[in-house]
Image (tube, rainbow, N blue to C red):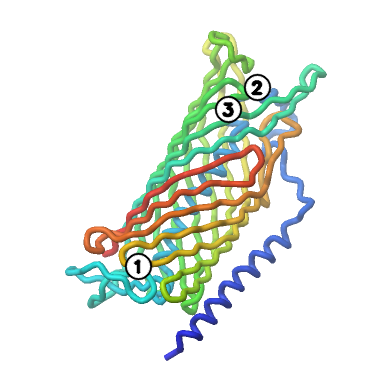
Amino acid sequence: MKKKGSRHHLSLIALLVCGCMALVSLAHADSTYVPPGPPDRPASLEEPPPEKTASSVVTAPQTLKTAVRQTTALISKRIAKVIAPRSFTGKTSRKPDVSLDFDEYGMGISAGDAEQRNGLWANIAIGESEDERLLTTIGSGVRSTLSSDSKFDLNNYIVGIDHKLTNKTVVGVAISYERAEGTTGFNAGDMDSDGLIFSPYFATLIRDAFSFDLTAGLGWVDVDQKRNKDGSKVPGAGVITASLESRRVFISASAKGYYNRDRWNLTGNVSYLYAEEEQHPFEESDGRTYSRDVPSNTTHLGQIGVGGELSYVFDTIEPYLNAAFEYDTTYDKDTSGSEDAIYDRNGVVLGAGFRFLLFSNALVGDIQATKVFGRDDYDEHSIMGNLRFEF
């Protein structure tokens, strides 16, 4: 039997490995990399200025980043608690007749005859994002600047089910429905969308010291939008409407290291996310004299994340704090005719929450609030709740 000290040393090594992976990833990110200005579209097409552009074209980077990051972070967080080493979570097994119990290191469930291998979970997240980047255009020889002034509410509802193939390997699938509503000040418009996303995931625990998880996603998003004609904010200036469909794909990989001492738990994490969303061609019209065909375009996002979580276990509750640094390696800083849109590629996400047991251990709950700091002209915050049942 290995000594507890040896396990601690192995956990520390795992955390160092995660840190090294992060440094290597950042070192290979070309500091002179110039991201694509507009996303993929016909090069010969003349673009109108932002104030005369459909909302979905300009706000695509904002909505993609907010939605995909939220979905992948929620799934990865769920996986981490399921696959974490037994010595870290303190979790043993549950039998039908159970009682609230915390084991040596963390939130646990009283011992039974066999470990529960299936999990069913649900998550609700409510978030807001605001983008005030400056968009600069040149029209009729005149240079003009305006704020994107885009504000969105994003609600994300996820249900998932997973199965432990072994004590150290989990596979599962999650289905999420997302609803976004917002206003776009640059064109005096507004936009709302509905999306359905399918996300299979996999995780494995390595030597009880660190884990690796992988999540993929495929989804479809429907968008309805309108704007005032020529971007005028004067009532009655004329309203232009449009509807479109888009397809989203993403993949996210994460490596985590675990360390515990007494009732303190520490998790280190390094991750990479890549996503693309293709907006299909659509037509915007005022229903009378104005009509314009808008071509398809594809928005890209690649992001490295490095962070950690610290928690302390009481008898029936586990409060925690977490922080993550994020760095966008691939991005579209604007999707319209704007030539000087400012984009801040890095930021910090801070979070706080607590986990708890409900109904004699039948359910494990989690509530967390997060906020993004350090991105110029961009703000984002959210709150989420999760329940998980094992059987």
Give me the C-alpha separation between circle 2 and circle 3.
9 Å
Residue 347 screen position, x and y as percent:
63, 49
Residue 288 screen position, x and y as percent:
54, 9
Label 2: state its secondary structure: helix
Residue 40 screen position, x and y as percent:
67, 39
Residue 122 screen position, x and y as percent:
34, 51
Which residue corresponds to the image point at 66% horizontal and 41% vertical from the top-left?
Answer: 376
- Name the one closer to the observer, 174 or 315: 315
Q: Residues within 10 Å of mark 2 (few under 14, many from 20)?
A: many
Give me the C-alpha separation between circle 1 and circle 2.
53 Å
Label 1: state its secondary structure: strand
Identify which amino acid the numbered label 2 is placed on. Answer: Glu
Mark 3, residue position = 55
Identify which amino acid the numbered label 1 is placed on. Answer: Met
Please identify, in this view, whether the residue under mark 1 or under mark 2 is nearer the observer: 1
Q: How many marks?
A: 3
- Name the one closer to the observer, 4 or 215: 4
Which residue corresponds to the image point at 66% horizontal and 28% vertical from the top-left?
Answer: 147
Identify which amino acid the numbered label 3 is placed on. Answer: Ser
- Name the one closer to the observer, 18 or 200: 18
Mark 2, residue position = 51
Vertical position of residue 125 compared to residue 23: above or below: above
Q: Is residue 92 left or right of residue 1?
A: left
Mark 1, residue position = 107
Q: Quadrant of residue 53?
A: top right
Please identify, in this view, whether the residue under mark 3 or under mark 1 is nearer the observer: 1
Which residue corresponds to the image point at 76% horizontal and 50% vertical from the top-left?
Answer: 33
Vertical position of residue 115 compared to residue 320: above or below: below
Q: Residue furthest bottom?
A: 1
